Image (cartoon, grey):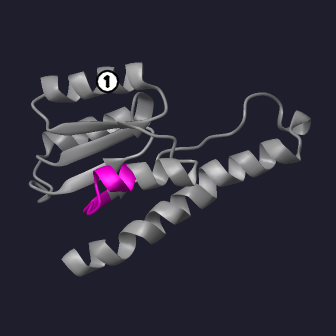
């Protein structure tokens, strides 16, 4: 399938495994240069090897995108993405009735604020580039 995105650049957050890795691989197969990010270096590098093995161009950035510092580091590595895949987040482990206020705030940060902040930081440049 040709999605017409060959030659573009994508940031894929939380992409060392699962859905994020699958998105990064699919984009790489379309000819997109992908910048992948995750908190843990070992699985992140394994994902990068898999993407390279599939013929893709990839840069791996160890970064926790739920933090301001992590988002800044990722955007320093890829300051002008054409595509942004916000994949970080998910619920805290365990029964939600056992979550305290800190658990809820961490979940809201990971699932909502960090995604909104990445969009805010990328959107103007994306719109300028078309």
Q: Is residue 43 left or right of residue 57?
A: right
- Image height check: is 62 above or below 1? above
Label 1 sits on residue = 45
Residue depicted at 40% across the width and 21% down the height: 43
Quadrant location of residue 45? Answer: top left
- Image height check: is 30 above or below 22? below
Total marks drawn?
A: 1
Quadrant location of residue 68? Answer: bottom right
Res. 39 visible in picture: yes
Residue 103's spot in the image, x, y percent?
A: 79, 42
Task: Categorize mark 1 by other alpha carbons within 10 Å: few (<14), some (14-19), many (20+).
Answer: some
Residue depicted at 52% across the width and 44% down the height: 88
Magenta segment: does it hold 77?
A: yes
- Image height check: is 16 above or below 70? above
Residue depicted at 39% across the width and 19% down the height: 42
Res. 130 visible in picture: no
Residue 60's spot in the image, x, y percent?
A: 30, 35
Residue 66's spot in the image, x, y percent?
A: 57, 48
- In magenta, the rendered stretch is 74-83
Residue 109's spot in the image, x, y percent?
A: 66, 53
Magenta segment: does it hold 73?
A: no
Q: Secondary structure at mark 1?
A: helix
Q: Is residue 73 left or right of residue 60?
A: right
Depth order, front residue of 119/54: 119
Q: Quadrant of the C terminus?
A: bottom left
């Amino acid at each position: 399938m040709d999605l017409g995105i060959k030659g573009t650049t994508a940031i894929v957050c939380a992409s060392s495994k699962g859905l994020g890795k699958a998105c990064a691989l699919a984009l790489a197969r379309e000819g997109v240069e992908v910048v992948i990010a995750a908190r843990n270096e070992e699985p992140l590098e394994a994902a990068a090897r898999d993407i390279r093995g599939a013929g893709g161009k990839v840069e791996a950035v160890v970064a926790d995108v739920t933090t301001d510092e992590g988002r800044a580091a990722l955007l320093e590595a890829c300051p002008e993405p054409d595509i942004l895949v916000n994949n970080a987040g998910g619920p805290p482990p365990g029964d939600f009735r056992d979550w305290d206020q800190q658990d809820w705030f961490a979940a809201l940060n990971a699932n909502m604020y960090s995604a909104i902040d990445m969009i805010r930081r990328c959107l103007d440049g994306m719109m300028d580039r078309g």
